[in-house]
Amino acid sequence: MLSLKHLAELAEGHAADLGAPVAAFDLRGQHFAPWPEASIMGVVNLSRDSWYRESVVMNVEAAVRRGRRLAVEGARIVDVGAESTVLSAERVGAEQQTACLVPVVRELSLAGVLVSVETYDLAVTRACLQAGAAVVNLTAAGDTEPFYRLAAAQDAGVIICYVQNGRHVRAVGDFNLQADHAAVLYDYFAREVERATRCGVTRLWIDPGLGFYYRNLNDSAVRVRHQIETFLNAFRLRKLGWPVCQALPHAFEYFEEEVRCAEPFFGVLALLGQTDLLRTHEVARLRGVLEAMQVIQ
């Protein structure tokens, strides 16, 4: 059982990381301050394979409608994607992704919505940035510098996602669970942050990743334990100097028919770990959690 004793030991063991300064920055006219001024990112899925049915849209008009609604509900960024990371999801080519995403990016951007595009493809990235995307939610690994240079040229932000054992999230091996995963994350992001800033990126978040796409994390207890520890240890990455983004999971095995309550629950844990940007399908529910937790300063 998660307890105050567990939290106290974690904080005491890494006390120097709790107060590490984290960058604030402006992005397309909006100011992003670090925790405890956390922000919400909403999700629009243009893939029919996404398991979160409430976020799935079937055409451009529906995607734009949902994106605008999420912004009204409290999302400061709206993340759009055209290929699910679910293991069984159909692979979607770059041309098809671009055809789906560009009209949505263009219309939402013209409406004043900050749009993030989840992708690991360079051609999709280029097209969406040219259409007005403000953020690249980068799910590629390895040869990342071309993505960083594109983002820098468009004065866009980047979310650097942790991808283990693969070129991108749809081409990974089994996940190597280690005793101190936060230390592994720190080393990975130290290298990627250096690459990104060297390429001219001045606005970025780091995303530890939660193992949605690794085959050996199908065991619910193992996966959820890993996710909880990742949330609670996120503050240890603050010494990198950049804000942390976390995608909130579902844990259907535990929440069952109340699965839409799962992301707000995990949002509490993410905020305790000093997460700065929370990616969620449940913007309105999470906004209430965030506002309630900010009552105590």
Image: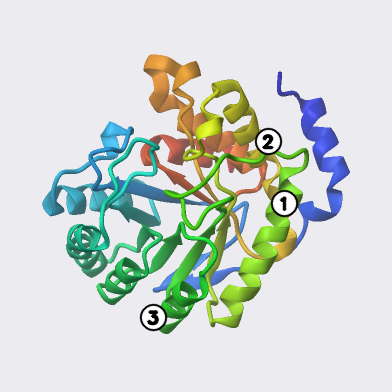
Q: Quadrant of the N terminus?
A: top right
- Residue 275 on image: x %, y %: 60, 49
Alpha carbons under labels 1 and 3: distance apart: 31 Å
**Is the C-beta separation of discs 2 and 1 under 8 Å?**
no
Q: Secondary structure at mark 2?
A: helix
Closer to the chain start, of discs 2 and 1, is 1
Would you name the residue on which mark 1 appears? 184
Q: Residues within 10 Å of mark 1 (few under 14, many from 20)?
A: few
Dot 1 or dot 3, earlier in sequence: 3
Circle 1: element type = helix
Q: Which residue is mark 2?
A: 229
Query: At x 64% / y 33%, what residue is drawn?
Result: 226
List x then y, in percent, for residue 179. 77, 38
User: Circle 3 sits on which residue?
Assistant: 154
> Vertical placement of 170 versus 131: above or below?
above
Say what amino acid the circle numbered 3 marks.
Gln
Residue at 25% in and 44% down: 47
Which residue corresponds to the image point at 35% horizontal and 63% vertical from the top-left? Answer: 114
Label 3 and label 2: CA atoms lie apart by 35 Å
